[in-house]
Image (cartoon, helix red, strand yellow):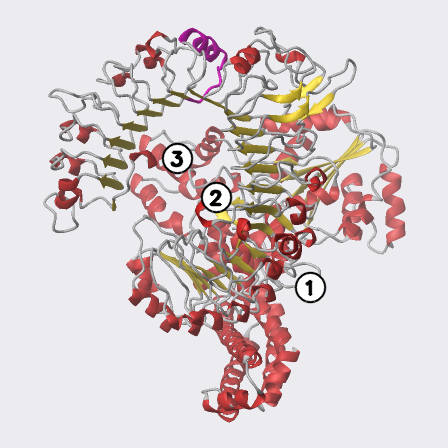
């Protein structure tokens, strides 16, 4: 990575040294000549770097030279950043001209002193660069290459799929192009050869050609190679391009041919088209197979869906490994065990497996195999072996700015879920993202970088959605190793004392365990992240002081979730800071005023700082701020005046209206010019706005075209006044039609919705929460993109729509065509879905509630009805979650009588209503008895989760549970007549989580519980009669899979019994409200895997478990985290 970073740093330095700002600085402080000399020196070295990148691959001397150069370039960059920051500070100084001059003279930055200091610093940097530049003359090294070939194992299914595309698929085009995409080493070339050499393929095509393209996409060379493959003879080297074209057309014209173009890297559409135009003359049925690592290449070369090659299955991976590593030797069980452990890290990549197996094939003893696994295997990457060299090829083909971005990901632990927006903000803070197009924000450009890396296969498990703000991804384990290698000593994950002591002073980026920060020696850090490994993290004042004193070059600082109360005033000394995350620190009440002196700050994250009461008054000084994330800061009383001057803001999570004006807070007019806002904007306390009609208009929401989500909260409190909303019309809060999500909460004005709502045709999510005066909602049914609809606490609501759909014969009327999730709760006056019905609804046995020609909820997957709703559209195709609370059983009964084929477009999959349902929750359902529930559950063959709550007419013992063979999560809540677990539960062999709450009559878990040996989580709460600790009670003896046990308010249990020692895999134990529990058993020491012990409302025990001094501490000293949370239900 040093070479890529050094080159980009040099380019960046030259750009800065050529800027108007640095030119002005040179004139102000009389150092212009020094800056020009520095620019000349950097430019000279940059020319050397163009060559050094390739040579560093094979030479440690060049690599060391680049490391030294990179260190100086970083120092130079920090120095120029110092100058720019000083210039910005000077520009922002308030007061008269005389006041400014006096301030400057009496400060440490007076012009004369600053000039001398800057001149010395620039000359020192230049001298170091000149010395390093002189050393470049001694290097004269050559670039080396390598090639490989993979075995074919486990690719029969892939071959069959490709053969179908080649031999059977009817294409409109004469020449059909099939891209094969996958990581390096997966065997794309081998698979193409596998298909190419198949006898059916040979008999099907008149002409077959196989050409390796690789990274040099020269059309003339490729045409020469195609002709050579077709004829077996290379064309005359003296032929011009037009002569080669004629020769090629003569060979392929009118023939049904197969051409394999292997290993294409070119991403330029025009170059690809220039080649494709020469290949379209084949007969119908011709095929071109393109192999590439880049999804972008696949999209450029073909309109069809690429064939994405995946890793080998575990069985096939083992077959390949065994064929090479264990060939001609007897199968030793120890070799098998070690081999399979190694394979777990190989990701099913044939090249990786083949390389490792080849190494092990020469090792004869068990000792040698163990040594390889524990030592050499982890060092293969460091030795530039075939594994790293192969995977690193993708990195080598990246442009330099993407090399920065990929290597930075080394800071994330393996398998860590990466928030893409945060990652992009890190890149921006480090200066990796270049704004070449002023019409795009840096974040938009950074996301293009991410997509580019993703399409090249560097990330996996990338989520989906219409917004990228919440997008997450992971980096494959195999990609983590090259990232670590190319990052070198510049980046490190510091998670032990040993690593902390080894990390050098020149390290620039770290993610570190909090307790190790004081051990870190480096003073040139640009990134400090922390990834907590337990929940008991806290930050001391000493650690804060250490960071501020020793890490003055920081650009990125994450201090989230550390439970500190105060931020030191000296934080302003981190003047290079671009990204500061202080979120999830619940006790922070205010920020120091000095934070506004960090004028380079771009991102300030304060989300979930629950007690934060105000933002700094001079926040307008943060002129570079683009993201102010203050969502869920519920104690904020107002916004500071001047916030509207931050016109670069792209994120303003929450705007709090000053309730009574006592804080002299900003009014809504400050939102007027913030038209770059993206993501979500939440405006609270709208019920307290004075002169609402004018104020609402001045917020200028209709011009905020980039907003994804708008949250409008009135937050009215009858005791505070401010509940007269009649003049606060929603009409004046009209948003831009690009809006995707809308939340309206607590509006008590006019009973009608605003007219603009029907114009928001891009809405995907609508949430409406009362209390409000709405009596009828507008017709949401025709919004084409609506996927989630939530209506809660509308106490005056009577109907959801005016008329029911007609469903005329021969015409299909769309009814919520895209809706996936519907939630209706606490609308006590709701009479029906429709005000006017198209058919009679009086017949109890009606099974058609809307016309049969109407597509009712064709996409609905999740439905929650917590309302006494007697009539609504039915939902036979629901496939995710059904939650019915305090409502009529009639719609459910009608749904269960339906024939899916009559109402949904996807009737071929199943004819049983709700047969694909995954989760079912019933709570106090009118007229739902045991027989009815039992009959319904027999249909729910795919059910994974079942919750039965407060159903007085349901007898669990009388139910048949056999049909629920896939059930993994069962909750039984408030069933007082339950005395013991139903015998039928023993059939639930897949049950992994069992929760029993508020079952006051439950006396025993016998005799069923001992059969539930697959249980991983058990929660028992408020079961006053339950006995768990009687003599001889051993029901937990076989529950070795149990990893979480939560017990709350079980008064008959006076002690934890001996059986606790059998829970050898238990990781979490929570004991809440055990007033009679006086001590823990000695057997606690046997639970060696326990990671967390939670104790709350157990007075004597809390005292005995005090760290180091409690009488029971020795029994639990091995447990990493001891907490005191108030409810076992959290577990």
Badge 1 local density, few (<14 within 10 Å), some, or many (20+)?
few
Element under label 2?
A: helix
Name the outermost residue toward the bottom.
Answer: 112
State the residue position of label 3: 340
Disc 1 designates what residue?
A: 436
Magenta segment boundaries in residue numbering = 930-946
Residue 234 x/y as whole percent: 79, 47
- Which quadrant holds residue 1031? top left
On residue 355, the disc is 2
Q: Position of residue 260 (x, y in %)?
A: 72, 39
- Is residue 645 placed above or below 1011 in the rendered structure? below
| Residue closer to the observer: 1079 or 870 | 870
Q: Is residue 665 above or below residue 1016?
A: below
Calculate the distance from the C-alpha at mark 2 to the C-alpha at mark 3. 15 Å
Q: Earlier in the sequence, mark 2 or mark 1?
A: 2
Residue 671: tell me if it is visible. yes
Q: Secondary structure at mark 3?
A: helix
């Amino acid at each position: 990575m040093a070479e890529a970073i050094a080159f980009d740093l040099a380019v960046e330095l030259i750009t800065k040294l050529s800027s108007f700002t640095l030119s002005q600085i040179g004139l102000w402080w009389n150092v212009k000549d020094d800056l020009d000399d520095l620019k000349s020196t950097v430019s000279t070295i940059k020319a050397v770097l163009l060559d050094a990148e390739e040579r560093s691959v094979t030479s440690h001397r060049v690599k060391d030279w680049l490391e030294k150069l990179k260190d100086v370039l970083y120092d130079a960059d920090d120095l120029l950043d110092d100058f720019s920051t000083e210039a910005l500070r000077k520009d922002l100084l308030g007061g008269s001209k005389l006041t400014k001059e006096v301030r400057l003279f009496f400060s440490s930055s007076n012009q004369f002193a600053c000039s001398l200091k800057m001149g010395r610093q620039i000359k020192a940097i230049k001298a170091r660069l000149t010395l390093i530049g002189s050393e470049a003359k001694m290097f004269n090294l050559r670039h080396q290459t390598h090639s490989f070939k993979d075995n074919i194992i486990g690719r029969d299914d892939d071959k069959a799929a490709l053969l179908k595309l080649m031999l059977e698929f009817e294409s409109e085009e004469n020449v059909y192009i099939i891209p094969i995409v996958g990581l390096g080493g997966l065997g794309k070339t081998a698979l193409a050869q596998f298909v190419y050499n198949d006898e059916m393929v040979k008999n099907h095509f008149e002409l077959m050609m196989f050409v390796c393209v690789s990274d040099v996409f020269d059309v003339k060379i490729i045409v020469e190679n195609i002709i050579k493959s077709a004829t077996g003879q290379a064309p005359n080297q003296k032929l011009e391009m037009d002569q080669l074209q004629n020769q090629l057309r003569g060979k392929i014209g009118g023939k049904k041919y197969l051409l394999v173009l292997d290993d294409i890297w070119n991403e330029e559409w025009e170059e690809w088209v220039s080649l494709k135009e020469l290949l379209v003359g084949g007969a119908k049925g011709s095929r071109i197979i393109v192999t590439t690592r880049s999804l972008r290449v696949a999209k450029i070369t073909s309109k069809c869906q690429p064939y994405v090659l995946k890793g080998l299955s575990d069985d096939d991976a083992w077959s390949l490994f065994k064929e090479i590593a264990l060939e001609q030797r007897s199968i030793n069980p120890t070799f098998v065990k070690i081999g399979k452990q190694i394979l777990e890290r190989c990701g099913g990549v044939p090249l990786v497996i083949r390389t490792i197996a080849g190494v092990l094939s020469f090792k004869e003893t068990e000792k040698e195999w163990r040594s390889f696994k524990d030592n050499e295997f982890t060092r293969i990457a460091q030795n530039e072996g075939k594994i790293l060299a192969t995977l690193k090829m993708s990195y080598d083909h990246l442009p330099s700015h993407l090399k920065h971005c990929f290597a930075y990901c080394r800071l994330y632990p393996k398998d860590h879920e990466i928030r893409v927006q945060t990652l992009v903000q890190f890149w921006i803070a480090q200066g990796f993202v270049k704004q070449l197009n002023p019409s795009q924000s840096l974040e938009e450009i950074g996301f293009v970088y991410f997509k580019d890396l993703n399409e090249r296969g560097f990330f996996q498990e990338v989520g989906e959605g219409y917004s990228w703000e919440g997008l997450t991804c992971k980096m494959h384990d195999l990609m983590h190793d090259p990232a670590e290698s190319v990052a070198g000593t510049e980046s490190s994950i510091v998670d032990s004392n040993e690593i902390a002591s080894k990390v050098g002073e020149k390290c620039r980026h770290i993610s570190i365990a909090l307790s190790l920060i004081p051990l870190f020696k480096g003073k040139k850090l640009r990134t400090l992240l922390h990834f907590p490994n337990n929940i008991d993290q806290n930050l001391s004042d000493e650690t804060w002081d250490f960071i501020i004193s020793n890490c003055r070059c920081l650009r990125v600082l994450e201090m989230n979730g550390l439970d500190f109360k105060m931020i030191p005033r000296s934080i302003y000394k981190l003047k290079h800071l671009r990204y500061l995350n202080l979120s999830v620190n619940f006790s922070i009440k205010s920020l120091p005023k000095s934070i506004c002196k960090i004028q380079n700050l771009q991102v300030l994250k304060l989300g979930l700082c629950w007690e934060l009461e105000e933002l700094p008054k001079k926040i307008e000084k943060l002129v570079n701020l683009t993201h102010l994330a203050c969502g869920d800061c519920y104690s904020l009383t107002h916004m500071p005046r001047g916030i509207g001057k931050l016109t670069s803001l792209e994120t303003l999570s929450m705007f709090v209206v000053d309730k009574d004006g006592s804080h002299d807070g900003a009014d809504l007019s400050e939102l007027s010019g913030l038209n770059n806002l993206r993501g979500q904007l939440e405006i609270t306390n709208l019920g307290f706005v004075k002169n609402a009609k004018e104020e609402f208009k001045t917020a200028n929401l209709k011009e905020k075209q980039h907003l994804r989500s708008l949250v409008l909260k009135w937050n009215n409190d009858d005791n505070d006044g401010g509940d007269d909303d009649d003049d606060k019309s929603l009409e004046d809060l009209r948003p831009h039609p690009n809006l995707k999500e809308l939340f309206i909460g607590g509006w008590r004005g006019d009973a009608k919705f605003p007219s603009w709502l029907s114009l928001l045709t891009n809405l995907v999510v609508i949430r409406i929460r009362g209390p409000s005066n709405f009596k009828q909602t507008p017709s949401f049914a025709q919004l084409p993109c609506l996927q989630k609809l939530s209506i809660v606490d509308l106490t005056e609501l009577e109907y959801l729509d005016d008329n029911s759909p007609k469903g005329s014969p021969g015409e299909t009327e769309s009814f919520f065509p895209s809706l996936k999730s519907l939630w209706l709760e606490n609308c006590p006056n709701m009479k029906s879905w429709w005000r006017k019905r198209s058919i009679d609804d009086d017949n109890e046995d009606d099974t058609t509630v809307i016309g049969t020609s109407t597509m009712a909820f064709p996409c609905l997957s999740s439905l929650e009805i917590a309302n006494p709703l007697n009539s609504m559209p039915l939902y036979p195709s629901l496939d995710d979650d059904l939650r019915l609370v305090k409502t009529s059983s009639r719609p459910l009964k009608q749904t269960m009588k339906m024939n899916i084929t009559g109402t949904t477009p996807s009737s071929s999959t199943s004819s049983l209503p709700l047969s694909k349902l995954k989760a079912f929750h019933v709570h106090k359902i009118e007229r739902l008895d045991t027989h009815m529930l039992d009959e319904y559950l027999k249909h729910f063959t795919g059910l994974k989760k079942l919750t039965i709550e407060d159903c007085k007419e349901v007898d669990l013992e009388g139910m048949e549970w056999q049909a629920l063979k896939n059930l993994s999560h069962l909750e039984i809540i408030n069933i007082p007549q339950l005395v013991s677990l139903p015998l039928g539960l023993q059939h639930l062999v897949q049950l992994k989580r069992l929760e029993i709450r508020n079952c006051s009559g439950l006396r025993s878990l016998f005799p069923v519980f001992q059969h539930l040996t697959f249980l991983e989580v058990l929660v028992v709460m408020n079961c006053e009669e339950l006995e768990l600790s009687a003599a001889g009670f051993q029901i937990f003896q076989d529950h070795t899979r149990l990893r979480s046990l939560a017990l709350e308010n079980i008064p008959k249990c006076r002690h934890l019994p001996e059986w606790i020692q059998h829970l050898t895999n238990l990781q979490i134990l929570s004991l809440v409200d055990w007033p009679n529990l006086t001590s823990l058993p000695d057997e606690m020491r046997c639970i060696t895997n326990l990671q967390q012990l939670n104790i709350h409302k157990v007075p004597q025990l809390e005292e005995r478990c005090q760290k180091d001094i409690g009488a029971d501490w020795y029994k639990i000293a091995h447990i990493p985290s001891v907490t005191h949370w108030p409810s076992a239900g959290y577990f």
